[in-house]
Image: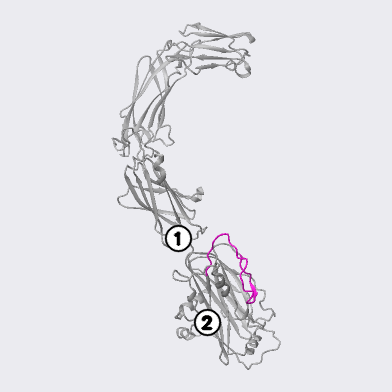
């Protein structure tokens, strides 16, 4: 039927196809026999307006009924009482070829120049076309489509004559004369810094007949569909892969950290020292992938002068939800090459989890290794996370000396707060000296409100005043007698943070063995305030630092913690406060205002009355239940219901006791 010299045949299947209306199959022959797949399938739907059933019940052919040198066929559909006459179209046979000036192209052989004088590697491609056929015209028109590297999203090859534009696909129409070869040469260049050097670059020209208006009763020709309708060739990039041109790498990975554990908030930079070796053949598009915790930020890489170029990017957890660093370590990474470089990282100031920092690393390339050598392509580093803070707890007593007349009559009925006795105010500062931030912590202030037999000692006049990122639970036993408060001048009892810092910077702190600092050294450096001498208590003993003592809440430390929270020989009010998000250098100020109950002191039969009054800090790295605020007896001074699903660190820092000494007419605080 197509006049190629091989026998063809038609098969009628009158009850096949959609709705059983029949199908005709056309099979072409070849040098190897009948082709497996039909070259054409004819169905009733190809004859619109005609209702055909049992199409293909009868088939007759091998006669040229229209004199175009091709045999036609007649198909019968007896159930529809129809006969279909089908003419054969002339077949155009096109011979095509695509030749390259180089079978293998070296990317270093840059013999062409772009418009901007950039040197590039290039190759000349020659396309040749010629047509033949029986019963076809002496000339035909073809539509050509030229495509470079069409299998890639970003083509690596471009047409040189299209500069300065980057063109990898273009079309044109040509007219061919029968039996006359048409050839066209085109320069193709390879872009610099391509990544895929393993896959050949395809150069392809496809073609099709241009449908022109035919003469009446003359059928349009058709291309021979049994041969390709495109001319194709490939540019192979030169590789160091041996005689078989197949590169099998052997990548090996080692890594180490510059620290054995990470302290949150430290200024020390986190470094991963990477060693990557290729013990096999060239590794193409070799990559290092580092999966990091979300709280770790990539800074840069540090390379030695002799190292192969390495670049890292792609760590965008805010976009992808994964913190994966991608490093290009060579394309190719040559055989027997060793890379040494450091990845510089910076964990966040506040790490969301106290679990270990885990870094998982893997190296690979687009040309795979043998399975037995991939065991050393993976490496993992785990860094324990340490929460390390240095807490500074300091206090001020206002006034430093309480003076009153012992012989002065004490009112029998308490109406105003001044009837109780002299005022005593404590101001505590809790400061974070770093390096870690304090996410959450608890502060306990123990206030000796009553003696063991229930008599008042330091009568609370107001709720605690807090300045900074903290808050205190409400105390129920504040001014229970509802005494009339006096109007007070600013700064007498509410000392600003700036005042507190100024006072702390004024004097020379006494040695760590002393709980109290003599007020004389302060007076020498500062004029005395009206009626109020600020008395500084040094809590430097309890600062937590690298050399300091850490207190952990565990079975061994339970007794220590309970002892710290005991009220001694008094019934105290336990004030519970919480601090949060305390960065390095931040402070929180707590002010407690009270009145010394003179009547109770006068009844004391000893010259020395010791009362425990202080502040305790606990830093929690996980949630847990804590004792509520309020009064407690020595027996009730236990912490219960302490639960945690993971290990957490608790740091206890305590202030000193408050001592009252009898000096005939004054008390030294």
Front-most of residues 358 and 286: 358
Query: In the rendered image of this protein, does residue 373 appear above or below residue 501?
Result: above
Residue at which label 1 appears: 262
Marks 2 and 1 close (CB-CB < 8 Å) = no
Work out whether mark 2 precedes mark 1 in sequence or the reverse, and give the earlier one: 1
Residue 305: x %, y % from top left: 30, 52
Residue at which label 2 appears: 534
Query: In the rendered image of this protein, does residue 186 appear above or below residue 276?
Result: above
Left or right? Give the position of 594 relative to 529. Answer: right
Q: In the image, is residue 627 part of the stretch drawn in magenta?
A: yes
Q: In the image, is residue 34 part of the stretch drawn in magenta?
A: no
Query: In the rendered image of this protein, does residue 178 appear above or below residue 121?
Result: above
Coloration mode? one colour
Residue shown at 46% from the left, 77% from the top: 505
Magenta-highlighted residues: 625-651
Circle nearer the viewer, 2 or 1:
1
Residue shown at 49% from the left, 63% from the top: 387
């Amino acid at each position: 039927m197509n006049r190629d010299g091989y026998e063809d045949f038609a098969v009628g299947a009158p009850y096949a196809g959609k709705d059983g209306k029949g199908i005709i199959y056309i099979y072409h022959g070849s040098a190897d026999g009948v082709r497996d797949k039909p070259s054409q399938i004819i169905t009733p739907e190809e004859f619109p307006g005609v209702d055909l059933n049992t199409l293909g019940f009868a088939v007759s052919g091998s006669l040229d009924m229209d004199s175009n040198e091709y045999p036609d066929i007649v198909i019968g559909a007896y159930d529809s009482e129809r006969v279909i006459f089908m003419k054969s179209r002339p077949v155009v046979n096109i011979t095509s070829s695509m030749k390259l000036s180089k079978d293998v192209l070296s990317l270093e052989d840059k013999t062409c120049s772009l418009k901007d004088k950039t040197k590039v590697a290039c190759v000349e491609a020659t396309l040749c076309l010629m047509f033949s056929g029986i019963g076809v015209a002496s000339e035909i028109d073809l539509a050509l489509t030229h495509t470079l590297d069409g299998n890639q999203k970003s083509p690596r090859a471009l047409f040189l004559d299209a500069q300065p534009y980057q063109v990898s696909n273009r079309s044109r129409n040509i007219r061919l004369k029968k039996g006359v070869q048409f050839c066209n040469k085109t320069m193709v260049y390879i872009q610099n810094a391509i990544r895929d050097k393993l896959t050949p670059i395809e150069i392809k020209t496809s073609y099709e007949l241009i449908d022109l208006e035919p003469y009446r009763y003359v059928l349009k020709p058709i291309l021979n569909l049994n041969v390709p309708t495109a001319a194709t060739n490939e540019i192979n990039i030169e590789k160091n892969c041996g005689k078989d041109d197949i590169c099998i790498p052997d990548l090996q990975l080692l890594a180490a950290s510059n620290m054995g554990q990470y302290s949150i908030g430290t200024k020390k930079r986190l470094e991963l020292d990477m060693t990557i070796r290729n013990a096999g053949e060239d590794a193409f598009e070799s990559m290092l992938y580092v999966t990091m915790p979300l709280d770790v930020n990539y800074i840069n890489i540090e390379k030695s002068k002799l190292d192969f170029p390495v670049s890292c990017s792609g760590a965008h957890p805010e976009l992808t939800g994964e913190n994966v660093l991608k490093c290009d370590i060579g394309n190719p990474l040559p055989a027997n090459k060793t890379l040494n470089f450091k990845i510089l990282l910076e964990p966040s100031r506040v790490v969301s989890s106290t679990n270990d920092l885990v870094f998982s690393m893997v190296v690979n390339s687009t040309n795979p290794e043998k399975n037995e050598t991939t065991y050393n392509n993976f490496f993992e580093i785990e860094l324990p996370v340490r929460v390390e803070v240095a807490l500074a707890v300091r206090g001020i007593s206002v006034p430093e000396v309480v003076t009153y007349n012992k012989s002065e009559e004490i009112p029998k009925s308490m109406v105003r707060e001044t009837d109780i006795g002299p005022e005593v105010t404590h101001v505590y500062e809790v400061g974070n000296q770093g390096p870690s931030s304090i996410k959450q912590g608890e502060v306990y202030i123990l206030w000796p409100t009553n003696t063991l037999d229930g008599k008042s000692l330091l009568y609370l006049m107001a709720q605690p005043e807090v300045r900074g990122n903290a808050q205190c639970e409400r105390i129920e036993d504040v001014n229970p007698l509802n005494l009339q408060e006096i109007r007070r001048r600013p700064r007498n009892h509410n000392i600003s943070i700036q005042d507190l810092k100024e006072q702390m910077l004024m004097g020379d702190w006494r040695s760590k063995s002393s709980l109290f600092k003599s007020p004389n050294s302060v007076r020498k450096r500062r004029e005395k305030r009206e009626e109020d001498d600020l008395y500084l208590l040094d809590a430097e003993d309890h600062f937590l630092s690298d050399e300091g003592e850490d207190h952990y809440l565990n079975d061994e430390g339970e007794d220590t913690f309970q002892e710290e929270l005991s009220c001694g020989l008094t019934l105290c009010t336990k004030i519970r406060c919480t601090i949060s998000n305390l960065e390095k250098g931040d402070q929180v100020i707590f002010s407690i205002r009270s009145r010394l109950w003179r009547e109770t002191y006068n009844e004391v039969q000893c010259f020395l009355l010791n009362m425990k009054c202080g502040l305790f800090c606990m830093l929690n790295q996980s949630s847990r239940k804590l004792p509520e605020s309020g009064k407690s007896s020595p027996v009730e001074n236990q912490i219960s219901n302490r639960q945690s699903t993971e290990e957490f660190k608790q740091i206890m820092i305590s202030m000193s006791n408050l001592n009252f000494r009898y000096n005939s007419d004054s008390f030294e605080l």
